[in-house]
Image (cartoon, helix red, strand yellow):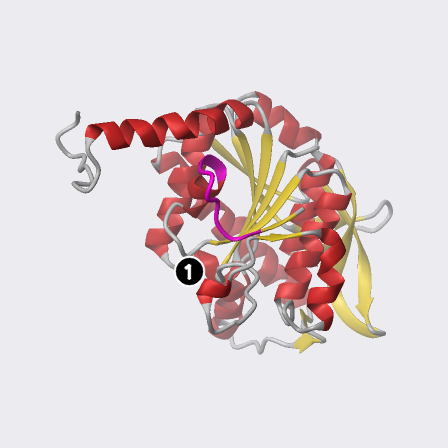
Amino acid sequence: MEENKTVDPRLDNAQWANVLVQALPYFRHWVGKIVVVKYGGNAMLNEELKADVMEDIVLLNTIGIHVVLVHGGGPEINHMLERVGKESKFVNGLRYTDTETMEIVQMVLTGKLNKDIVGILLQKGGKAVGLSGVDSGLLRAKKIHKDGADLGFVGEVTQVHPEIILSLIQQGFIPVVSTVALGEDGDINRYNINADTAAAKIAVALNAEKFVQLTNVPGVLRDVNDPASLIPRIRIGDVDGYIKDGTIAGGMIPKIECCMLARNGGVPRTHIIDGRVPHSLLIEMFSERGIGTMIY
């Protein structure tokens, strides 16, 4: 054993061995499969937790699981807009994106955050390549209006061309995707895309085995003030009922809708898990207990 490695004194060798043996069936199941992880927003703000997430992804990639990491970066975009003295403007919950804001979105997502994440993955021993939705025409989008309001250069994904991702994972790389998209044919504009929705559509296009949203909440809670009220599994057919009774509300609704989008598109397993819990991705992938909420 390497001298700089510490062992949890609460577990003896037999217990450690038992943990590994219990994980073995999960290793066998996931090797060779594609898992799309959406990582972003407030779950990215803690540098120590970010390092844990990257370690998890490198471990998964090392044992032969094809992880595709799709990231957002709303807080970082807000910070940069503040630095340049530009006010963030939201219309019906979506960021209004004029020409100047779109330049900053692209700079932050594809120039800074994307490369920061790639750099951490490389430092952890992984093989990673940064992409945006513009590269190889990965994401195509059209301009959207929200309840009749003009949102500027905000778009929704209309096409996913996953060939570049498939090529990279076949070579053992971890693709890291920022969600700036090209317009459709004849449209030379670039669009700011909701990262949750983009990740779900990428998962469908890749025929992924699993779609995971790493968030800053434990999952769906019966009582938002009580983490112990977590609902571990929700059938798609029960989602409307949870929305009507207020169990699923606010920002959780679009996250659930993205899970449903992926599941209805053929992704067998979709999850919302707490990115603030160290190594939550490994707990979900390799243990019977799992973590967060699964939509099935």
**Measured from the top left, where is residue 74 in percent x and y?**
55, 63
Q: Identify which residue, 12 or 255, lies in the foreground.
A: 12
**Measured from the top left, where is residue 211 in percent x and y?**
61, 43
Give, as a single range, the part of the protein colored magenta: 285-293
Q: Identify which residue, 86 or 210, lies in the foreground.
A: 210
- Give yes or no for residue 291 being in the magenta stretch: yes
How many marks on residues? 1
Q: Quadrant of the N terminus?
A: top left
Extreme residue toward the left, this view: 3
Q: Identify which residue, 131 or 39, lies in the foreground.
A: 39
Residue at horizontal 64%, vertical 72%? Answer: 250
Quadrant hosting residue 29 = top right
Quadrant hosting residue 45 = bottom left
Provide the secondary structure element on which disc 1 rests.
Answer: loop
The residue that mark 1 highlights is 45
Q: Taking the image as drawn, is residue 50 in sight? A: yes
Instruction: Reply above or below: 253 against 60.
Output: below
Residue at horizontal 55%, vertical 53%? Answer: 232
